[in-house]
Amino acid sequence: MGAARRLDDTFAALADPTRRGVIDLLREQPRRAGELAAAFDMSPPAMSRHLRVLRKTGLVEEDAVEDDARVKLYRLRPERFSELRAWLDEVEAFWGGQLQSFKEHAERTRGKKRP
Amino acid sequence: MGAARRLDDTFAALADPTRRGVIDLLREQPRRAGELAAAFDMSPPAMSRHLRVLRKTGLVEEDAVEDDARVKLYRLRPERFSELRAWLDEVEAFWGGQLQSFKEHAERTRGKKRP
DNA sequence: CAGATGGTTAACGACAGCGTTAAATATTGC
DNA sequence: GCAATATTTAACGCTGTCGTTAACCATCTG
């Protein structure tokens, strides 16, 4: 049941385009807080809050870099994403084996019509 | 780019525990609007809005039942869930080779997925 | 030490989400 | 036609989120 609460926060965190953008950037490599703020043309406090949200949900983690203790590096953390995938698996389970065929079919005819 | 906008709405829709609960119920079988409202001890208007949100994102669809045109049946729709899975796949792609987290993921979802 | 730099917290205004009740729309059945 | 049923829309209040600027803490540097 604690997991359900965590999903609330996880989905809420991912609902924001800026935060998904941050995740997208962190996919490539860890980044500094200020670097992320600049990347989205946003004030440092605003980005700081986004990072706090992401940190709280466990989607990212922060750690210091040796040479300068002021700088904080943010990086992705896989666990929550796996949790998300687990939820998806559970929901999609009901379609059973037909999901794959449906998915493929949907991708082929995407944007068109439904039978 | 249209897809990104859609993800906003999809994640926002899933951030609400009631709406995830609705999805969970619809997993088993289609349900009537009023039935869903009762299931969550919630006023019909409140549930109606939740259903509108889910409908708008394409996570569920509504269709009438023959014998009584007042009744509307809601059911799940697979496409958006697949889209969500595609996003997850993309994000998770980055650490596929480089981290040990792939093992964690495999452990969490063991026995559910095909190779 | 003084000042600049990196980052976060505090306070504020704008705006959207969620629930409620009341009213509206559509359909069924007597 | 008229009351009852199923669902949605309208209007209201509460609460939380997102961005901004100002102030704060910690750390590096000359």
Image: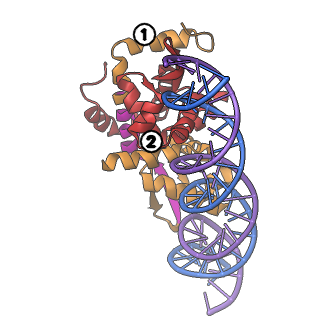
Chain colours: A orange, B red, C purple, D blue
Which quarter of the figure has residue B96? top left
Q: CA distance from mark 1 to mark 2?
A: 29 Å
Kindly identify which chain the residue marked by label 2 belongs to: B
Q: Is residue A36 left or right of residue B14?
A: right
Q: Residue furthest top?
A: A115
| Residue B52 visible in the current orientation | yes
Residue B28 percent coordinates (x, y)? 34, 24
Classify mark 1: residues with Cα within 10 Å, few (<14), some (14-19) or many (20+).
few
Point out which mark residue B87 bears.
none
- Residue A107 to residue B90: above or below: above
Residue B108 percent coordinates (x, y)? 28, 35
Which residue is depicted at the point 52% across and 13% down?
A106
Residue D11 percent coordinates (x, y)? 71, 50
Q: Which residue is mark 2?
A: B18
**The C terminus of chain A - image quarter:** top right
Classify mark 2: residues with Cα within 10 Å, few (<14), some (14-19) or many (20+).
some
Eye-nearest disc, 1 or 2: 2
Q: Which residues are magenta?
A: A71-89
| Circle 1: residue type | Ser
Q: Which residue is mark 1?
A: A101
Q: Is residue B35 left or right of residue D30?
A: left
Kindly identify which chain the residue marked by label 1 belongs to: A
Q: Main secondary structure of the magenta part?
A: helix
In the image, residue A12 lies in the stretch drawn in magenta: no
- Kind of element beneath mark 1: helix
Which residue is depicted at the point 24% across and 25% down?
B111
| Circle 2: residue type | Thr
Judge by depth and name the residue closer to the eye, D28 or B93.
B93
In the image, residue A75 lies in the stretch drawn in magenta: yes
| Residue A76 visible in the current orientation | no
Q: Is residue B50 left or right of residue A94?
A: right
